[in-house]
Amino acid sequence: MLLRLVPEFELRRDVVPWLAERGCAAALDTSENSSALYVVNVERNGKIIYTWKGNERNTHIGLYDLQTKQNEHLYMFEKNLHIISCSINNERTLLAVSFCQYTEEERASQLLQSVSKYLTLLIEIHPINNVRVLKAVDNSVRVQFLYPVEGRNASRGSRLLLVSEDKYIEQFDIHVVAEEDHKVVIQKSGQLPRAKVVDDLVWAQWDMMEQRLFYIVPKESKSTLRCVQFYPDENFNSILESHLDIAVNDTQLKLVNFGYDYCEDQDVASKSLNLQVFTSKAGGLCVCCSLVSDTPHEIIYSIYFLHKGYNKTFTVSLERTESQQLKEVAFMNLDYYVAAYLPGQFLHLLNIQHPDLLCYSLFLTGEDARIDTLQNCSIRSPWVSTVLDCNAGSLYDVSISDSALLQFLQKSKLDCERLAALHCALLYFQHTEGLEMQIIRWISENLSICHSFDPIQEFIIASLYCRMCPETQNLDKLLPYTSLHDWIGVVPGVICATDIISLPVLEFQNSKGFWEKLNSNLESVKYAEPHLHYHSNVLRREWRSLSEEREERRTTAYLRNIFENAKKVLSHLDTWDSEARLVPLFEEEDYQQQLLMGLMVAQLKDHLMRHLQYVGKKKIDQIVLDYVANLLNLVHRIMKEVWRRYQLHSCIFCFDERGSAAEFAVFHIMSRILEAANGMCMPLPPGFHTLHLGLGVRCLPLHTLLHYIDNGVLQLTETCVRKLLKDLDDTEQNEKLKFSIVMRLPEYSRPVPERLSPVEFLPLNYLTNMLAEIENQGVHPYEKQDHVNARFVEETALKHTMTLLGLKYS
């Protein structure tokens, strides 16, 4: 099971034993069809309000505190009532209750025709004292106290929302005073001040954590979603408006997260719109809606990604078609994902932050989609990563299981499943060392099974995105999160249609938090968000241009600055890892890779400066150095895990014996790393090419080795070539190898002015410079004190020269 549910509260576990101690037998019936004991509300501060019937059929209201794990009796009515809604204020001094005064049987007796069916009361409970009637009407009413910002000083007043089935919401201002013996009473004896909040709504949802009211009003052929934000200073204002192409039933009001009426909600659910609004910490705003299908055994639901400006409608054909199993789709908010869940059928985890490509969402069926503890759809998400099973009276903390996700990744047969699982593992779990190590192992074992994406590229890009984006606001819109530009595959069993929708209109001033992030997301959409992400096209062109130029043109201040950038990256990296390195990397200079490092620093810095001007140059410099250093460190991390797995030692540069099967496996993995790096124009740690070439010499036949060199898979490096020339003796086979290698030496221009030579015959320049370096630099870390075979160098240089001139050598 991919989703892990941890019970935070259960009526059977946390309340029933307490009631049993109080001698209440009637409440012990906790079956799903029982209305004796059920949850009526969950407050923002973790207080759960429930009701039960006493032995004398009295109606009780109790409270369970998630922090203290304690129950508390709040109030008792000395008659059998059906509680519809209940809320307690933050100070726990006032209780608002709405209930039905009589049953249908009593109404049928025509004895109570002159009495209002529903009554809404405001009760002083610190201590239990006065009771005030707020409403006496024939339509049901829901109540909800507003809560102040956490940490704010307790107020002398409370604000109460009253939601009427007559399709309006109003706010009551209740001021209290403290009397002797710490008694708290309502200050005014007359009518309480109140203000109309909303009129003519057909759907409403309460966001208890952020004190927001989402609601829908019908407007011509479409619907309009609006949001009212309530503030600690007792003000509120409409802050959002968005037009939705959703048909609504304007005869029946549907309420979400305004408590739970066990009987009434089940009746309303079958007649009204199944719709919920979810927000994410990153500024995501989604509207999830279950639609009616004309085709039997088919489920249709839509997700409006309002922060992205489009809507995706999904059509799912069900595996089993027994009509009794067809239930309503339930939606859950997991912050990074929205879950669409149909018990016994499917679990669809839809990526909120990156919903553009369907392959970043997980669609599960069968055993993978099973959630044992949620076998019905009477569930709500009162806040992020939390689910309330209204029928069972249980509150769960919901998260994705990392172990189940890894198992799913390992057994997946489709690229869309692998890519979605890999993306989830890297970005949802936010850089977990153990999980990262297991992902590297999976990648190294499955390099050839992914056909539509490169798992090494995806691992590096997504890991960098995860590491860097929390550093600075809006950085997530500027850095790449995937190696893919598009994806044309399909998810089996799911048909997806995408429609462009109008962006929401925001009206706020100096608002921080969610609204600021949502506004930033909307601005990104307006300015064509995909083009904001950094990509390597310009970097690739510039690197090739500089790599191909003659040395005289590269001795500029610009190039000196490029190489200074590379030095900063490498010195920055040295401060992270002071331990002796298991893999022999970062132990030599690699001018080509340093050039690429420095260019990436320069171009990424320019990219961020254009869009993050408010951050400042010093901060951007640090971000860029961290990005490139993390990139190199990720490659080193992959190499380190592979090195450990195959139990290689660091001194493999011994060319007098053939490589082992383990070395050949590592060589293959390094070839795929090189392919991934080339595809993204990504620098590699200095020494990578030397290590790769050394393994190639040990593991490959000569003709294959030369073929790899000629096709750029292996790159000749000075370190490895020097080692070859010195270590191999003068047998015929070794001379053939050495001659073949020397014949393939590049002109090897160096982008530093000190290395310029007045001689223009470059093949001889290279050999001369190589010998000069050996003399000037002293002993190399891999070398022993021995002499260069001068005769061999002389003959090889002459052969090389004669060949280039088209002359015969005898």
Image: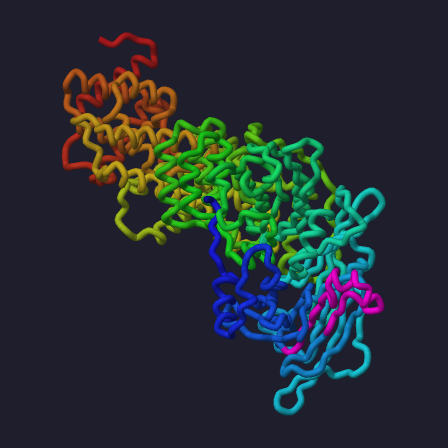
The residue sitting at 29% across, 13% down in the picture is 802
> What's drawn in magenta, residue-wise?
93-121
The residue sitting at 65% across, 59% down in the picture is 260
The residue sitting at 38% across, 49% down in the picture is 433
Q: Is residue 168 left or right of residue 810?
A: right
| Image quadrant in which the C terminus is located | top left
Please name the colour scheme applied to the rendered image: rainbow
Residue 561 in percent (x, y) is at: 46, 44
Residue 312 in percent (x, y) is at: 66, 38
In the rendered view, tell whether residue 652 sits above or below residue 427.
Answer: above
Q: Is residue 176 magenta?
A: no
Q: Is residue 152 left or right of residue 744?
A: right
Q: Is residue 117 magenta?
A: yes
Q: Nearer the viewer, residue 326 or 427?
A: 326
Residue 209 in percent (x, y) is at: 61, 62
In the rendered view, tell whether residue 770 sits above or below residue 336.
Answer: above
Residue closest to the far front: 109
